[in-house]
Image (spheres, helix red, strand yellow):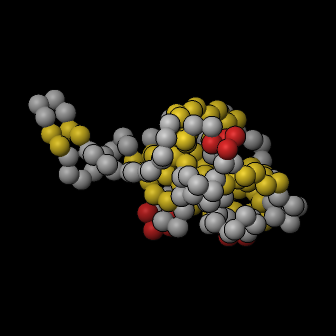
Amino acid sequence: MKTIKVQPLTKQDFAPYGAYYKMDDPQGHSLNGELHRFFPDRLTAYHDGQVAFSPILVKKPEKMLVNSIEYHTTTCEIIMPLNDDMILHVAEPSAGSPITDKTKAFLVPKNTLIKMNACVWHLAPLPANKDELCAMIVLPECTYMNDCIVVNLTEDQQFIIEK
């Protein structure tokens, strides 16, 4: 079975899948007031309609075996780990047929907002350290019903993620 090693999150390595911004350590130009510093537009996404903010709780598995993955054809997905660092596995779009041997797994620091591009393969983020990860998912309303293609992987396609 394939094993994928978790790698540090870098702009260059994550670029084929999307973008990210460390929300609890803002950098660059800010708009300043007497009591505030506002860092506008650090990460942007377009959604034509209602946007939903949904919590997800993910238990830490004994073995990080991935046997199914998903993608969204018309929208990016935004995820932010709230209580722990998270492990996020991704693979580039491949016209609906998973190519898991090109999958990467990234260690995403807590409070880092991730934007995955449309059609990027992924599934639920995994906790890096705690028994249960709490993260926020931002998607257009009802994406899980309208634009979520889940594929069960064959044994040859399945993989294990290792830290």
Q: Residue at x 53, y 67 (%)?
A: 16
Placement of 108 over or under 93, stated as above or below: above
x, y percent for residue 141: 57, 37
x, y percent for residue 123: 68, 49
Q: Residue at x 58, y 55 (%)?
A: 74
What count of labels does the image hold?
0
Corner quadrant of residue 100: bottom right
Residue at the front extreme of this rendering: 49
Q: Quadrant of the N terminus?
A: bottom right
Residue at the top extreme of this rendering: 35
Q: Residue at x 83, y 54 (%)?
A: 152
x, y percent for residue 18: 50, 59
- Comparing 75 with 122, the one in front is 75
Placement of 158 over or under 49, stated as above or below: below
x, y percent for residue 39: 26, 45
- Comparing 44 with 142, the one in front is 142
Residue at the right extreme of this rendering: 155
Q: Residue at x 48, y 65 (%)?
A: 15
Is 130 displayed left or right of 44 in the figure?
right
Q: Is residue 130 visible?
A: no
Q: Is residue 9 visible?
A: yes
Corner quadrant of residue 25: top left
Q: Quadrant of the C terminus?
A: bottom right
